[in-house]
Image (spheres, helix red, strand yellow):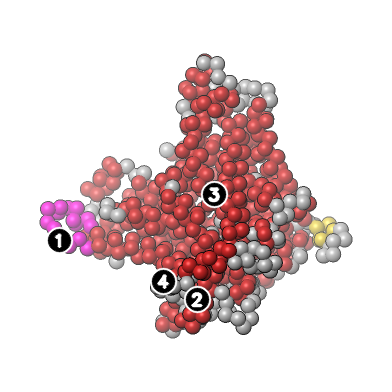
């Protein structure tokens, strides 16, 4: 199929005057629309299904149109107390997700900017050594050292705390690497000029480097927020207290209730409503700040 | 490094203290602990541990279960990397060609990046449900009796589809950025030299995209190995027993459910070595790319 399209696309280029039906162009759009639908449909179906009653879904299967129960289903998902302890609701989990996402993004940016500033702009004794210590962490994701990490956090008494949730996730050098690359691309003349004017390291950072970095900070903030919000394995291990659950971590609880529910009709609509709630904020951020987001992604890895 | 630098006796160390202390406590300590524990046999009731040398590794590697999981992980990783890269490349090439609606297509193809893998897994449980799911109905229409969570390969199929779906956006973004960085003059020259679109793609565009493609291949392998944990955890619906799991999931199962600390740590260390090899390959390649540019 691709062969035919590209052939005709080329021939239209050669004869731009004549205006045949441009099959190549139609083919391109057909492929792109198919791709877009493939990405969109699962979420759309989940969303439609979340606006029906459980009984309807149980009888008729996944729904393809809007239902009438959307308002009450989402209200329940947000505010109906549930879970084993009957004191956790969607709103509580959303707050926890926000704390994790924001805390992770802000903490990571501050800590990695400081480290990158030291590594790029200072000449000091263990500079290279510090660089290697930090960048070795890029090699091993949290998943491969999950059990000992859990034990360390446990022995520090940080289970079921926000700091235990956030800080171990910060222990990788992605942000530092990103800022290092960016600082190195900042022209050296700026530092020379600042030094001639008598600016110290603190003044140089606040007055020159920080204003220059703002776009980069925004870009990395978006990526890190989404990354933090979407954490699953670490929160699953770390939080046993339901009032500490994030939305993404709550998904597992929903699945277990669903499978182990016995003879009751499973809460399909509640599950799908929670899934939509768990994905809506990061999706909104990615779409709204798409330019920063794409810039941050593609420029951090060079 | 910069040619002009500050030199202050204390300030740079102060800047490094937060990062270094977090890394020491939450990275090096656990990593060292994993390596240590992989040489010990932990008493399940917590009464000390005995040094057993390489026994944990031997037990792990000789177990038929581990071989089975490793094979599945290999197949899974290959399929996920191949399909998500191929589909994303096709879409990126098309999105780069069209003028009208290019921006809308870009958004439509990338927003799924923001969905967490376990959330995608939860949706999949419904969409692939044996009785209610549209995918199952479609499979039945073609005579395929699809049973998620019961049939090993059916569950594996669902895992691959969901993981590919989740990974297309990031590949698409990078391929599109790579395509757009190919200079206009090169494209025009290629267009004059070679009117056949497909052969032009393979002789000009594809080699120019190769660095992006290689970088993405490593990213995709890492993704399939580690980040699919949430998908795997949700899709087998709490019954990993007779369903496919990946190597990372087995580390978690043996360590947290099975209580086999030594075995789980040995598996961790094996994975660490695997990631190290991948990263070295990546760095070497990136170095070469820098040289030739």
Mark with earlier residue (2, 3): 2
Please state which of the two labelled residues, at mark 2 or mark 3, is closer to the viewer.
2
| Residue on which the image places disc 1 | A20
Label 3: element kind: helix
| Figure check: B95 above or below A202 | below
Q: Position of residue A98 (x, y in %)?
A: 57, 52
Residue at the image position 52 percent from the left and 72 percent from the top: A269
Query: Do tags 2 and 3 sit on the same chain?
Result: yes
User: Mark 1 falls within which chain?
Assistant: A
| Residue on which the image places disc 4 | A66
Mark 4 crowd level (few <14, some 14–19, many ≥20, 10 Å Cα)? some
Mark 2 crowd level (few <14, some 14–19, many ≥20, 10 Å Cα)? some
Q: Report which quarter residue B199 is drawn in.
A: bottom left
| Residue on which the image places disc 2 | A53
User: Mark 2 falls within which chain?
Assistant: A
Please state which of the two labelled residues, at mark 3 or mark 1, is closer to the viewer.
3
> Residues in magenta?
A9-23
Label 1: element kind: loop
């Amino acid at each position: 199929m691709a062969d035919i399209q590209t052939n005709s696309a080329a021939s239209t280029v050669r004869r731009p005057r004549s205006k045949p039906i441009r099959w190549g162009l139609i083919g391109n759009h057909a492929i792109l629309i198919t791709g877009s639908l493939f990405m969109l449909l699962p979420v759309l179906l989940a969303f439609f299904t979340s606006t029906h009653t459980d009984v309807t879904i149980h009888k008729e299967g996944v729904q393809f149109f809007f239902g009438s129960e959307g308002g009450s289903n989402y209200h329940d998902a947000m505010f109906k107390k549930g879970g084993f302890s009957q004191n956790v609701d969607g709103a509580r989990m959303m707050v926890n997700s926000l704390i994790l996402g924001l805390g992770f993004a802000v903490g990571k940016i501050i800590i990695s900017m400081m480290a990158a500033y030291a590594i790029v702009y200072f000449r000091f004794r263990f500079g290279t050594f510090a660089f290697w210590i930090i960048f070795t962490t890029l090699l091993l994701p949290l998943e491969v050292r999950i059990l000992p990490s859990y034990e360390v956090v446990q022995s520090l008494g940080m289970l079921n705390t926000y700091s235990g949730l956030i800080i171990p996730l910060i222990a990788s050098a992605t942000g530092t690497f990103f800022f290092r690359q960016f600082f190195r691309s900042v022209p050296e003349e700026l530092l020379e000029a600042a030094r001639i004017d008598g600016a110290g390291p603190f003044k140089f950072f606040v007055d020159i480097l920080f204003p220059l970095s703002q776009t980069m900070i925004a870009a990395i903030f978006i990526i890190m927020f989404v990354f933090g919000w979407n954490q699953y394995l670490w929160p699953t291990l770390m939080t046993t207290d339901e009032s500490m659950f994030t939305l993404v971590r709550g998904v597992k609880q929903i699945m277990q209730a669903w499978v182990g529910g016995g003879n009751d009709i499973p809460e399909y609509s509640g599950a799908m409503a929670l899934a939509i709630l768990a994905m809506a904020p990061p999706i909104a951020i990615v779409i709204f700040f798409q330019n920063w987001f794409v810039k941050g992604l593609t420029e951090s890895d060079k | 490094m910069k040619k002009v630098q500050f030199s202050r006796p204390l300030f740079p160390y102060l800047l490094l203290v937060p990062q270094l202390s977090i890394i020491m406590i939450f990275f090096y300590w656990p990593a060292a602990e994993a390596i240590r524990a992989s040489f010990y046999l932990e008493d399940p009731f917590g009464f000390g541990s005995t040094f057993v040398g390489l026994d944990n590794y031997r037990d792990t590697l000789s177990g038929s279960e581990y071989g089975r999981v490793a094979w599945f992980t290999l197949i899974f990783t290959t399929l996920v990397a191949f399909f998500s890269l191929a589909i994303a490349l096709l879409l990126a090439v098309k999105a780069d060609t069209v003028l009208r609606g290019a921006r809308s297509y870009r958004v439509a193809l990338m927003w799924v990046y923001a969905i967490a893998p376990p959330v995608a897994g939860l949706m999949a449980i419904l969409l692939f449900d044996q009785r209610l799911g549209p995918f199952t109905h479609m499979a039945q229409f073609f005579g395929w009796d699809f049973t998620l969570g019961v049939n090993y390969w059916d569950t594996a199929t669902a895992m691959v589809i969901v993981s590919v779906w989740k990974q297309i956006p990031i590949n698409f973004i990078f391929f599109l950025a790579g395509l757009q960085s190919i200079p206009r003059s090169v494209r025009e020259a290629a267009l004059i030299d070679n009117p056949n679109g497909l052969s032009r793609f393979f002789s000009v565009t594809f080699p120019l995209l190769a660095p992006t493609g290689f970088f993405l291949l490593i990213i995709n392998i890492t993704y399939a190995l580690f980040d699919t944990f949430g998908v795997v955890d949700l899709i087998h619906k709490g019954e990993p027993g007779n369903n496919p799991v990946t190597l990372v999931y087995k580390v978690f199962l043996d360590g947290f459910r099975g209580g086999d600390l030594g075995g789980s740590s040995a598996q961790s260390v094996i994975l660490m070595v695997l990631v190290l090899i991948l990263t070295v390959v990546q760095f070497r390649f990136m170095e070469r790319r820098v040289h030739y540019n």
